Image (tube, rainbow, N blue to C red):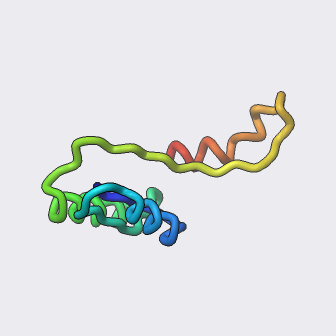
Amino acid sequence: MAIGYNTGAERADTLRASLPGGGHSIFAIAIDDPDSVRVAALTVEATHGRADILVNSAGTTRPVPHANLDALDEVASVNVV
């Protein structure tokens, strides 16, 4: 398994250590940096041969009034980039 992270290298390493078996890797990737994404794809291919499943789990939030969905514009831009 390949685990990418933008920030939180320690969390990624903790996740890797908790997985059964071996051969898992972690690497830095910033979704808003095309070169970083390219390097990540090449690293996964070189290390694992291919990617069978991709989970993009990125986001940020801040407290906003429940009914004020317009206040979530910052969250949407992070998740769509």
Q: Residue furthest top?
A: 67
Report which quarter residue 66 is drawn in: top right
Q: Residue furthest right?
A: 65
Q: Residue at x 48, y 47 (%)?
A: 57
Examine the rendering and report whether any part of residue 31 can be seen: yes
What x and y, as percent, mark residue 25? 30, 65
Question: Which residue is at the front of the view, 21 or 81?
Answer: 21
The correct choice, above or below, for 20 with respect to 17 in the image is above
What x and y, as percent, mark residue 54? 33, 44
Report which quarter residue 31 is drawn in: bottom left
Q: How many marks?
A: 0
What x and y, as percent, mark residue 43? 23, 65
Q: Residue at x 28, y 66 (%)?
A: 39
In the picture, measured across the screen, residue 70 lies left or right of residue 13, that is right
The correct choice, above or below, for 79 with respect to 32 in the image is above
Q: Residue furthest front?
A: 20
Question: Which residue is at the front of the view, 62 or 1?
Answer: 1
What x and y, as percent, mark residue 70? 76, 35
Examine the rendering and report whether any part of residue 33 can be seen: no
The correct choice, above or below, for 27 with respect to 20 in the image is below
Question: Which residue is at the front of the view, 80 or 14?
Answer: 14
Identify the image quadrant of the N terminus.
bottom left
Q: Residue at x 18, y 64 (%)?
A: 47
